[in-house]
Amino acid sequence: MQPAKLAIDPLWQCLCPSWASATVLRGPRAIARGTRPALQDLKHSPVQQRHISSRAHNDSRASQGDGVEGAAEPRFSYVNRAVSQRSEAVHRREHALSLHRKTRDEDTGDLRREATPFLYTRLRALAIGGKVRACRAIAELLVRDRKEKPNVQLYNALIHSNVSHDEGAAWRVSEYLEEMRAAGLQPDTGTCHAVLKVLSVHPDHLLRTDIQEYMRARWFQLNEDGAHDVAAGLLREGLFEQGLERIEAMRREGVRLHGWLQDMAVYMLCAAGEVEEAYRIMKLRYDGGEVGLSRTVWYTLLDAGSSYRHHPSTSLIWNSQVNAGYLNPSSGICLNVLTTAAQAGDAVLATDVFTHLSKRGTAFQSIHYQQLLECYLSTSPPDLKRSLSILTIMALEKLPISLAETRALYLHLRAQPAFVAEAFTTLRELHEQGRKIPIAALNLIIECYVQHRNLPEAMKVYKLIHTFVPMAEGAKKTFANIETLNLLLRGCRLASPPDEGLASFLVSELLALRVKPTALTYDRLILVFVEAAAHALKVASAANLDAAPAQTQREKGRQLLDWAFRHFIDMRAVSGASATAGGTSRQHPFNDVLGAVQGSSTLGWMPRFGTVERLATQLAKVGDVRCWDVLQAGEDSAGEVEGWGPKGKWVRRNVEEAWAKATMKVGEGEQAGRERSGTVLEGEAQAAAA
């Protein structure tokens, strides 16, 4: 067992370098494999003696077993099986040794007649090529047949041969160093550099540290190749900061950096996501005029840079390599480059990507136009006209335009309300130029006006939609869709006060255009009447309770809530239903409108969570028992209403509190009425008595 490595004081190393070197090169991580004898023990290898004695012993045991096998099988079968397994193991070991000897003979068969100096030269050449077995065979030939003593030159070659990525190993280097220590051989500067070169391929942090400490203690200078090997070893171990610091130090000292080391650094940094550092290395090489830069390195950096949305590296590689025809990136990388250009607002780069893809014959999708649109909006100043023109190009290409393609424009116009009118004017100009204006672009203008709570301007745009109908589609009243009407219904709810009259007009428009409503249409229609009812009740509570206008507002609020509940019933697929309130049945005309569009199909829709909560609470505030019907419907359809599971109990609590306050007010009102009636009767009695 190897003794533990002692802590070595630097001053002690300087004063006693021989003791420090013996301790440093003790090989703390050497793994005793026991399958390869040392060079000085080749003639009488203990391993070979053990193999021979074990084989003779097993052969005698096997011969004895052959004589009694038939009689002993029933009683001692487990013994025979053990002997058989041991014989098979010995056979496999002998086969492996024979293969090793055969390979060694093949490697050295033509060299036995060569002179010893030639063998040393051949050994060094094979070591540089990483021929582990051939170097070992020649070393054994020199020691066993030529009677050469094991020396530093032999060990240097054996250590250097482990640079092979498949046959080499760091543990074998540790064994060779341990053999040198046992033979009393001191590693020289060639040995240290050979170890560092092997460790640049097979990382071993502790062994490299030991070698560097040994070199400092011996005042060995690290040559140019050794500095490259140390930096490569640090990079392979993932110590990027230390590796880059060493590369930077080499650059400051004027050391000519090899291309393979810088390529290796770029590859590893890109794999680790450190695109900025990889770009800095390639930018220095490109600006320095280095010729013969690997296209694979450029391609790797382009892939990583565009994936991480790193605009400087992406722009550099596209302009210097792709536009020059040296690289032909894949469609996925092109999309990443387009996204990077969109985020950076580089319209030139985005246009170049589109040109490159069009030359390839790529069929553009919505995502390509969306990124280009965002790119024009990210420029300084934003190019609103080009962004809107992209929507017309998509319409020309018959690509579906959803909300996702217009979100960038919506965010831009929402932040700057003054540009909404300019955007609508731009659409009119594009239409006059013969461009096909999609309905999604006009819905975008309406949505922006609704968001700014400017319902009159939104209605103006709606009334002008029919002027944008393409001539090729013939005469049409309009080409507004359900999304247009849903946006306007949202505007009716956000208006101050909520405009239920305009909502009634929009429903009649829906019927005239034969547009099929959606669940969102019913939901927003319910909200319009609920908010209008809440506003009317708020006005009534602010005025004098005995005044006629207050009573009118109170009745209006109740009527609007009744209509909201009827729309809720329609949404729950009770077509043409009539609700009874106060013993009277009234059929609202909206039911006929929606029922005509709906037909006889059963929708079974449920409003959103907030709509159900708002409707049930407002009904409870006026003491309408139908609030419990709405609450029960929400609880029965908890799986259909998003958010009802965690928040449904709060809806019930709000409804119960509103119901309790409403019934309390009713009780107080009845008591006040009875008191007023008693006072009147008492006055009349006193008057009659007088």
Image (cartoon, rainbow, N blue to C red):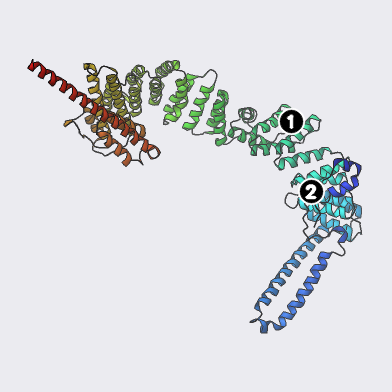
Indicate the position of residue 401 as horizontal and vertical percent values. 42, 29
Instruction: Work out whether residue 216 or residue 596 is closer to the camera in this orientation and state it.
Output: 216
Instruction: Work out whether residue 170 or residue 305 is closer to the camera in this orientation and state it.
Output: 170
Indicate the position of residue 369 as horizontal and vertical percent values. 48, 28
Give the residue type that dot 2 points to.
Answer: Gly
Residue where numbered disc 2 is placed: 129
Quadrant for the C terminus in the image:
top left
Lower sequence index among marks 2 and 1:
2
Task: Give the label on residue 290, or none.
Answer: 1
Q: In the rendered view, does 620 fall on the left or right side of 298?
A: left
- Relative height, residue 194 to residue 263 (above, below): below
Instruction: Work out whether residue 644 or residue 34 is closer to the camera in this orientation and state it.
Output: 644
Q: Classify 10 Å Cα crowding around label 1: few (below 14), some (14-19), many (20 and above).
A: few
Q: Quadrant of residue 65?
A: bottom right
Q: In the rendered view, does 503 fall on the left or right side of 130?
A: left
- Relative height, residue 595 to residue 99 (above, below): above
Give the residue type that dot 1 points to.
Answer: Glu
**Gap in Å between the C-alphas at discs 2 and 1?**
28 Å
